Image (cartoon, helix red, strand yellow):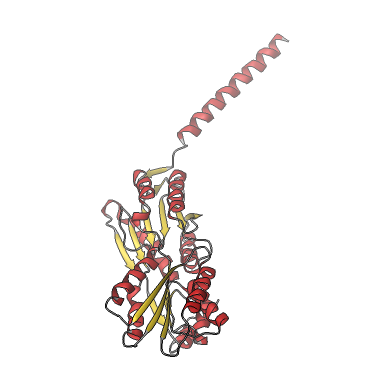
Amino acid sequence: MIAQSARRFSRIRALAAMGALAAVVAACGSSPSTDQAGTPAEGDPFKVGIVALDATQITALNERTAAQKKMKSIGWETTEINSDGDPAKAISAMQNLVQSGVNAIIVQTYTPDQLSAGLAAAKAADIPVFSTAGGLAGGGEAGAVELVAAANVNDEVIAAIKDKPKVELLQLRYTPGAPCRSRAEDLDAKLEGLSNVNVTRQEVKIPGGEQSAQEATSAWLQAHPDDGQTTFMIWPCFSEAAIGAVSAEKQAGRGPYPLYTWDISKPAIQAIQDGYATGVLWIQVDKAGEQIVEMIKEWRDAGGSWQPKDVTAPSVLLTKDNIEQTLQENPDLLS
């Protein structure tokens, strides 16, 4: 009996020692496994955190889908956090991704000044931040893909209204988003001195861009009856807002009025074909998604010699004159 008790005690001491050793090993491996900033330890995958603008906004969704597909093809892992169009949630997402030990972060749409606390957290951890649709790289960001393309559309708008005797222009804006804000600022600058244009500015919401744009357009149409003398123009800063505006026109039995916007989608294509959209800038966000991945690869290869970099996503203005040819050449636009 005494011998058996001694043997049991010896086994217990051995198991305790093994447990203590395992605890020490686990503690030593609890910090992010990187040899240097942004570089995973040998055998570990490169991990990229993505701060999504919103789960439903089509342009942002298509862009990050393309980026994730590209990253998966080269063996990288991704973690996505939805910010619901809220800069405060975007900052929180960045801080959470830093804590999780990602090797790089991609943020959609927000400008550096909106993300100061998140950028500070990433900088403290030596994690590079790359931006898409947030304007030029700034605030310590490592690089950016620019999707604003304001002049491509706004110059067409000004050309269409500058010589008209009386114009009612509805701006459907989304100020928290960098592309929309920059597009609106560019248009406002170009409208200065045009005394023939009366501008109504309305904010739309994300999520819910289409619905809030429909409500704003309905109110605008009701407040401005068509007298047969006035030129009406609708300027939504992204395509979901444009589709909401078209719905309001149809519901009110008005229009179609000239409408220019950004970001292609199946409903936007239909609006061009039906004559409800005059021009829609197709920003090739699938290419933008690939561009941001290529930039991160370049950053990894450059090491300490990297300098912040900006690139512009390719774009084409689609109108009734080129939509059918474009669809023949790019059938995936309808998928």
Extreme right residue here? Answer: 1
* Pick the front one: 121 or 186: 186
Q: Is residue 110 visible?
A: yes
* Pick the front one: 102 or 185: 185
* Pick the front one: 150 or 127: 150
Residue 217 on image: x %, y %? 49, 75
**Which corner quadrant of the image does residue 167 belong to?**
bottom left
Residue 210 on image: x %, y %? 52, 70
Q: Is residue 166 left or right of residue 12?
A: left
| Viewport quadrant of the C terminus | bottom right
**Which corner quadrant of the image does residue 307 belong to?**
bottom left
- Vertical placement of residue 116 versus 309, above or below: above
The residue lying at 29 percent from left, 58 percent from top is 308
The residue lying at 50 percent from left, 34 percent from top is 26
- Vertical placement of residue 136 versus 230, above or below: above
* Pick the front one: 115 or 223: 223
Residue 168 on image: x %, y %? 40, 80
Q: Is residue 195 left or right of residue 278?
A: left
- Vertical placement of residue 63 versus 5, above or below: below
Give the number of marks: 0
Residue 266 on image: x %, y %? 53, 77
Q: Is residue 334 visible?
A: no
| Viewport quadrant of the N terminus | top right
The residue lying at 47 percent from left, 45 percent from top is 100
